[in-house]
Image (cartoon, grey):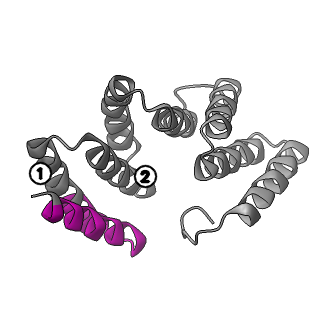
Amino acid sequence: PFVNALTMQRFGLRGLYINDPPFCHEMERSSINLFKQIGEMWEMFLAYSIELTAYFYSSDFEKSRSINLELEELASKLNAKMYLGWICMRISIIDYLTGVTSAESSIENLKKSYSIGVETMDLTGQIISLGFLAKISVYEKNPTEASQYAVKTYNKVRDYKMTIPHVQ
């Protein structure tokens, strides 16, 4: 079951990368169910993350947010600080884009998620947090701040040793 679940998870990731959200959701849902059956929490967590990212990229922010909230409880139980940073980051940008929170509140939470990325040495989380900070600065018509975040993001991407399209 573990190999089957992992294979489906990786096929779901492929669906994310080739912009096939329905395939991604189907594969991740199947892998999540198998991971639950065998009690593999960490890989299940990753499968959920892939699935909610596909919802996010499809602008289904409600579904992405609800999965993030489910994961927050699991991350707390597992003491998964890096994942808690990711959850904070994703909910912050979703809430900003949907008008649930102010730019100030979202910026504060994104800075918190960035700090968690630094603490856990999660370069991907740092890059995405900085990118979202730049995005909010652009939307809020603050070009100086946006350019500062863009430069910080670029410098972090240069340090990144893996090629992951949605990060770079």
Magenta stretch, main secondary structure class: helix
| The quarter of the displayed image where residue 68 is located | top left
Question: Range of the magenta residues?
Answer: 3-27
- Mark positioned earlier in the residue sequence (2 or 1): 1
- Residue occupying the point 30% across, 31% down: 70
Quarter of the figure that contains the C terminus: bottom right
Q: Name the residue under label 2.
A: 59
| Image location (x, y in percent) of residue 147 | 86, 52
| Image location (x, y in percent) of residue 151 | 84, 56
Label 1 Cα crowd, 10 Å radius (few <14 / some 14-19 / many 20+): many
Q: Is mark 1 on a helix, strand or loop?
A: helix
| Image location (x, y in percent) of residue 4 | 13, 64
Q: Name the residue under label 1.
A: 34
Marks 2/1: CA–CA distance: 27 Å
Q: What element carries label 2?
A: loop
Foreground mark, 2 or 1, reads 1
**142 lies left or right of 140:** right
**162 lies left or right of 61:** right
Question: Type of residue at label 2?
Answer: Ser
